[in-house]
Amino acid sequence: MSDATNQGSAMVPRKSGRIDGRRLRSERTKQLIVEAYLALLRDDNRNPTAAQTAERAGYSVRSVFERFPDLHALRVMATDYSMSQSAALAPARHVDGDRATRIRSQVETRAGTCERGLKLWRMLMVFQQDSDELKKRVRLGRERTIDRIEQMYPAELAALDAVARKQLLVALEALTDFESWARMREFHNMSFEDSCALWIGAIDRLLPPTPQP
Amino acid sequence: MTLVRERGRAPTAAEIAEHAGYSVRSVFERFADLNELRLAVVDQAIVEGRSDAALQALDLDRANRLRIQVDSRAHNRERWLPLWRVMAMQPERSPELAARMETIRELGMRRIEAVFAPELATLDEKERRNTLIAIQALTEFESWDRMRDMFDLSFDEACATWVMALDSLLPPTSAVS
């Protein structure tokens, strides 16, 4: 009995270890497929196919569809993956700094997010019309931007009434949108620093005076 | 355009023909393909944009220029937003379509430049360009779309947001003007 028990207890971890290992490998493959899809987007492929994604990841098309029922599911997972990465890479900094420091910090963080995530954002703009899941994520991305603005400029926003506060939040969100960043970088050929400087100047003019403590 | 507004997507040739009361063949007798038809609609938007009434208000004071410019742009956005959405949704835009989208943006930029010439004249070249780019970003179709769709602002509330933002971004009006 005790042997049997021992045997049994020795086998259980071995079996679950095998399952866990397989699951881990499968998860890793899934992640590599998602990363391949995102890499293709970054290479300016606005609509990567399953075959292109599989080739880039080094797997077969069958492997892709074993893990994702369709390309839409892959797009949703790529969006979630990228949004988590983006949140991890862009924590709020200098929230207690003076006005100039907070503006610079918010702009540099947002600029980094836009620079890294522009191509994914464009994919979302194309496919969100047919997908409530993607629409939800677009909205979430924008809500996070607004949350960050509120976090960075509480003193300035507190000085406004509800209507003026909402107007300002809407304007700041529009100003620092992905497409606004893209226009500066791609159409106006502005450098990263010049684009940041433009946003800094515009935000400074849009924000009300900082109340004195 | 009626179908684009109703359905929020690019209509098929069959849908267009049925709506217009013609055969699909008739559609393709007049337009080589759907892209050509789409371009014709965009060209109509450009013509309307060029004949916009806002340019007739150049001599007014700052507050009135702001109000008229915003009102005019807002109506333009409201009218053509469904078409813009359809164009923006194309994963692969034809060069002709991409060029027309740029023309629309360029027209918007020149409009701002003309209407707010007295204020922009007080800035050096770099500041002037930066102000124009910031105003353009704020008054794009996408910005209007978000105000109306995501933030649920009424037409008037959305206009008020643009007026506030433009007024903050523009430098003081010089006394000479």
Image (tube, coloured by chain):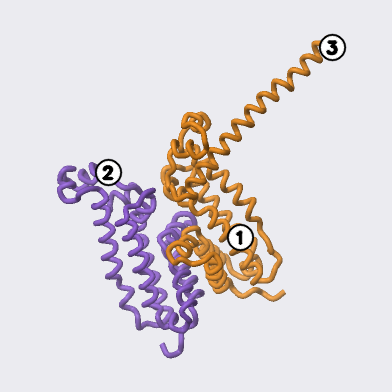
Chain colours: A orange, B purple
Label 3 vs label 2: CA separation? 74 Å
Q: Amino acid at mark 2?
A: Thr
Q: Which numbered disc, 3 or 1, marks the residue that appears first in the sequence? A: 3
Which residue does the numbered mark 1 point to in the structure image? A109
Residue B93 locus on image (x, y percent): 35, 52
- Do the residues indicated by labels 2 and 1 lie within the same chain of the protein? no
Which residue does the numbered mark 3 point to in the structure image? A2
Q: Residue furthest bottom?
A: B176
Measured along the vertical axis of the image, is residue B9 above or below residue A60? below
Instruction: Between label 2 and label 1, give the one nearer the viewer.
Output: 1
Label 2 vs label 1: CA separation? 43 Å
Q: Residue at x 54, y 68 (%)?
A: A199
Q: Can residue A15 be seen?
A: yes
Q: Secondary structure at mark 1?
A: helix
Q: Would residue B19 appear left or right of A24 to someone viewing this image?
A: left
Q: Secondary structure at mark 3?
A: helix
Measured along the vertical axis of the image, is residue A186 above or below residue A141? below
Observer-nearest of A16 and A204? A16
Q: Residue at x 19, y 50 (%)?
A: B31
Label 3 vs label 1: CA separation? 60 Å
For label 2, the crowd category at 10 Å Cα-Cα, with few meaning under 14, some 14 to 19 and many 20 or more, is few
Number of residue marks:
3
On residue A23, the disc is: none
Q: Residue furthest right?
A: A2
Residue A92 locus on image (x, y percent): 66, 58
On residue B12, the disc is: 2
Q: Can residue B157 be seen?
A: no
